[in-house]
Every structure is written in structure tokens, then in C-alpha cells.
Image (cartoon, rainbow, N blue to C red):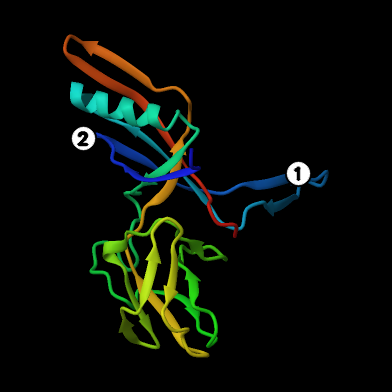
């Protein structure tokens, strides 16, 4: 079983999602009352919780099948974060100039997709949506590349020249896993089903 299957999880219609980025900090209180704070991660990881309306029998079956196919928290999958799933301004059209990716050196042909999410280190994007991908080299859009949508690697037919700015625009999913190995369901009344709560946790596929 692969660590992350290249399938997107679509929550049942009507569900509300809450969540966002989180950091891991180490805070030590000194005898003087001052604090020493250390950031243990170079970039955030995201979590989400889903809760919502009554499930139809069909939605319940689909959700249960997907959960069991992943063996609970064991296998990861793709998830479209409602709070961030494309480059550029939310709701705007994707352009090949949305995001700086790298600078060419005349030799390297393969580059990891990244986005600037405000952290000191760019966030690697490993699950782009291939049909949305647009790329430019030195301000000129090009189609001379291939994209691996299971790694986020863009490989050019010819290495971009030394000093050439490589930019891109794309939509993307986030690799996640279920937070728990148990699916909590309820039946509030005859003929109705409900998901009590479902947690998702981001998986970091590329070291940063």
C-alpha cells in the first residue's frame, strides 16, 4: 500500500470545514519569568475538522468505503483545502506568473513546485492539479515541460538558462490522512445518518 494514494477525498455535500495551519513551538519559562521560545518546525502543518448535516445512505456508503480503503489513518490521500488551493489571489484566474518557483542555472531541468505561504521557507507542493498547470521562463509562457502530479516535479525539455526566472500558476491539493483510525457515526433518527466528527491531518511529503 502506497503512503499517499493519488485520489482526492471530497467531503459529503453540506459539510462545514474548520481548520488551518499550525506550528510546533518549544517554550521554556525561566526563573526570572522570561521565556525562551524555539520553533521546532521550519513550516506549518495543517489540520481540519469536518462536521455537518445528515448523511444520505449513498453518502454514508461512499464515505465508509473510502475510509476503509485507506485503513483509517494508515494511508494518505489528496484533499482540497477550502482555505487555500491555488496560486495567486483567491478567486482570481490562474496565470503562469503567479508564483516564483526557482531560478535557472542552465543545467537543471527538474524543479519542485512551491508556494509562498508567508513562512521563512517556501511550501513544497507535491499534489498539483495537472490540468491547471501554467509555466513561464523569463516572463514567457512555455509548454515545453512535463509535470508529475504525484510529486510536484516540473521537468523541462531544455534546462532554463542561467539566471532565468521560473514562475508558475496552478491549483493544488494537500496530502492528508485521517486523524484517527475510527469513523464516528450516529443515527439521530429513522432513515438518517450523521458523521459525528472527522479530522484530517496534513502529511509532509518533502523535507523543508
Q: Quadrant of residue 85?
A: bottom left
In the rendered view of the protein, which quadrant contains the C terminus? Answer: bottom right
Where in the figure is residue 45, as x and y percent of width and height? 51, 49
Q: Earlier in the sequence, mark 2 or mark 1?
A: 2
Neighbor class of circle 1 (other Cα within 10 Å; few <14, some 14-19, many 20+) is: few
Residue at screen point 31% across, 78% down = 143
Where in the figure is residue 156, as x and y percent of width and height? 42, 77
SS at mark 1?
Answer: strand
Residue 31 in the figure: left or right of residue 146 = right
Where in the figure is residue 83, as x and y percent of width and height? 34, 51
Q: Does residue 47 appear anywhere in the picture?
A: no
Residue at screen point 52% across, 90% down = 162
Instruction: List the single residue furthest toward the bottom.
Output: 162
Front residue of this view, candidates 118 and 124: 124
Q: Which residue is mark 1?
A: 29
Which of the labelled discs sits on residue 14, or is there none? Answer: 2
Neighbor class of circle 2 (other Cα within 10 Å; few <14, some 14-19, many 20+) is: few
Q: Does residue 49 appear anywhere in the picture?
A: yes
Q: Is residue 9 above or below residue 136?
A: above
Residue 147 in the figure: left or right of residue 205 = left
Cβ–Cβ under 8 Å for marks 2 and 1: no
Front residue of this view, candidates 77 and 48: 77
Q: Quadrant of residue 60?
A: top left
Amino acid at each position: 500500500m502506497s503512503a499517499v494514494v493519488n485520489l482526492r477525498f471530497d467531503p459529503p455535500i453540506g459539510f462545514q470545514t474548520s481548520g488551518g495551519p499550525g506550528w510546533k513551538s518549544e517554550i521554556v519559562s525561566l526563573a526570572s519569568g522570561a521565556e525562551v521560545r524555539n520553533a521546532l518546525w521550519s513550516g506549518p502543518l495543517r489540520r481540519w475538522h469536518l462536521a455537518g448535516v445528515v448523511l444520505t445512505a449513498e453518502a454514508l456508503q461512499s464515505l465508509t468505503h473510502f475510509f476503509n480503503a485507506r485503513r483509517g489513518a494508515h494511508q494518505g490521500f489528496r484533499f482540497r483545502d477550502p482555505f487555500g488551493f491555488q496560486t495567486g489571489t483567491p478567486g482570481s484566474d490562474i496565470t503562469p506568473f503567479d508564483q516564483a518557483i526557482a531560478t535557472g542555472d542552465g543545467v537543471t531541468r527538474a524543479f519542485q513546485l512551491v508556494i509562498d505561504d508567508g513562512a521563512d521557507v517556501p511550501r513544497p507542493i507535491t499534489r498539483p492539479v495537472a490540468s491547471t498547470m501554467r509555466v513561464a521562463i523569463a516572463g514567457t509562457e512555455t509548454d515545453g515541460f512535463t509535470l508529475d502530479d504525484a510529486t510536484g516535479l516540473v521537468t523541462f525539455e531544455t534546462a532554463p538558462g542561467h539566471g532565468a526566472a521560473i514562475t508558475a500558476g496552478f491549483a493544488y491539493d494537500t496530502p492528508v490522512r485521517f486523524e484517527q483510525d475510527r469513523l464516528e457515526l450516529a443515527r439521530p433518527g429513522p432513515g438518517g445518518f450523521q458523521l459525528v466528527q472527522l479530522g484530517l491531518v496534513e502529511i509532509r511529503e518533502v523535507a523543508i
